[in-house]
Amino acid sequence: MKKIYFLMLIVASVIEAENVETVSEVFKTNYSNQMIMDIEAALARAQASQGIIPEWAAKEITIKANTKYMPSNQVSKEYAVVKHRLVARLNIWKKSLDNGAEEYLHFGATTVDIYDTLLVLQVKRSLELLSEDLLDIEILLLKLTKDNIETYMAGRTLGQHALPITFGKKTSTWLAENRRNIERLEHIKAKVNESGILKGAVGTYLGLGENGIETEAMMMKELGLAKPSVADWHGIRDVFAEYAAMLAIISKSFGRIGDELTLLQMTEFGETLENLGIGAVGSSTMPQKKNPRGPGKLIEYSRVIPRQAEVILDDMINSFERDGTKSDTQISEISINAEKMLKRAKELLSNLEINKDKMRSNLDITNGLILSQRVTFELAKKIGKNTANDLMHKVASEALKNNISLKEAIILNPTTTKYFSEDELDLVLDPETYIGLAIKQTEQVIQEIEAKRLIN
């Protein structure tokens, strides 16, 4: 019966960790304290199974691995005396342990083992939550893309009209990039999962006995982590640096979306609109303004998160076996900011309005010049590529100079007018029939993403 109760306590602890629903909660004091207790209890169970400490002591430690035995107010008072964050916690916890079990708490371990493993567990849970957010965003992007497969608009390069595309084609690139970011997080998850650590002060398992490597592996299994690398990493923070770098890349992805939606909502474009709801005020003094807010916040996060990542990357320079520089606070902050960014992205994409009519009308603002390439290709079949290209540059220049449509310029030019009837020109100058493989391309992206979601 005691064994069943013992196992129930372990399962309950795992469930409690999984029930944390936000990244900000993962880094709060109560969650951290619970994880510290879980880590110490896992160590005790691993050592008990090897006969290093008594089984009854491991059971007592596990049974009392609950934050009600580590009240924050008492920990704060103890910390004021001992000036050591872990010792303060252990001293308070020990008071609740019976029959001398406190003698076997934190047996052979060192503070850096506990806090580095805590950070691993926090990052692991953060990765799970951030991945869920990206999967939610993927659903929104799938819908946005499907709804706009045939929404015709101008494709722009260097800020200028280039060739016709569809808005679905545009958002399919957001969709594919978001999926790559999901896969990036999956990649780093595997490394984080192998990073639980119990190697002692200088990473040689001193204090843990001859079976220290096995104890470490058993402890991580108890914590739901994979078999850890035998190599010491206390002073080598590359896995956390890679995690931060992944968040920086993701922030740039959403910064790009934010930047584009800011531009598309410009008065001159009016192709998208962030619906902020009835009663939302754009400006305190200019009633007509509908200022984008979500897009700007995404741009802001795309600037802040990479700067935080730089600090975490700098922590890879650790003197000797390790020094006092640690990026725990920065990892907490970058994780929380990443969550805030994804929440903002979900709100924005959920309330994004697409002005299909405006997108279509904007295709015509160059008076057909956006299709000059197509006319060139048609002419090339009759007079050769280079000749056609030179000729159409002149025709386009005349259209711009005289403020007339491309169709009019073609008709007025004595050479080009010979090769097209008016009906042929109308067909060639229809932008909806000159989008390349945009629709097929978009459909294939959707199919690929939906197939990957079935695997997830």
Image (cartoon, rainbow, N blue to C red):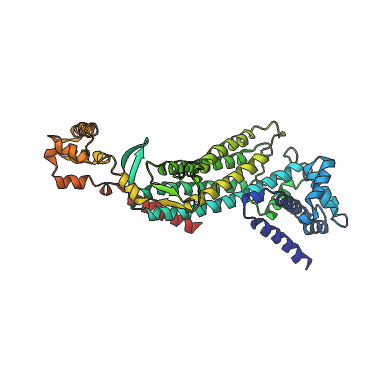
Q: Nearer the viewer, residue 261 or 12?
A: 261
Residue 424 coordinates in the image, percent (x, y): 16, 46
- Left or right of residue 293, residue 210 in this image: right
Residue lying farthest to the right in this orientation: 99
Q: Nearer the viewer, residue 345 or 326?
A: 345
The reply to whether residue 104 is in sight is no
Q: Quadrant of the N terminus?
A: bottom right
Q: How many marks?
A: 0
- Left or right of residue 409, residue 360 in this image: right
Is the residue 436 above or below the residue 21 in the image? above
Q: Residue at x 72, y 59 (%)?
A: 10
Q: Residue at x 74, y 37 (%)?
A: 202
- Left or right of residue 143, residue 437 in this image: left
Q: Nearer the viewer, residue 340 or 131?
A: 340
The reply to whether residue 98 is in sight is yes
Residue 337 coordinates in the image, percent (x, y): 59, 44
Residue 164 coordinates in the image, percent (x, y): 31, 44
Q: Quadrant of residue 369?
A: top left
Q: Residue at x 28, y 43 (%)?
A: 364
Q: Nearer the viewer, residue 419 or 159?
A: 159
Residue 456 coordinates in the image, percent (x, y): 51, 56
- Left or right of residue 217, residue 450 in this image: left
Q: Quadrant of residue 368?
A: top left
Residue lying farthest to the bottom in this orientation: 1
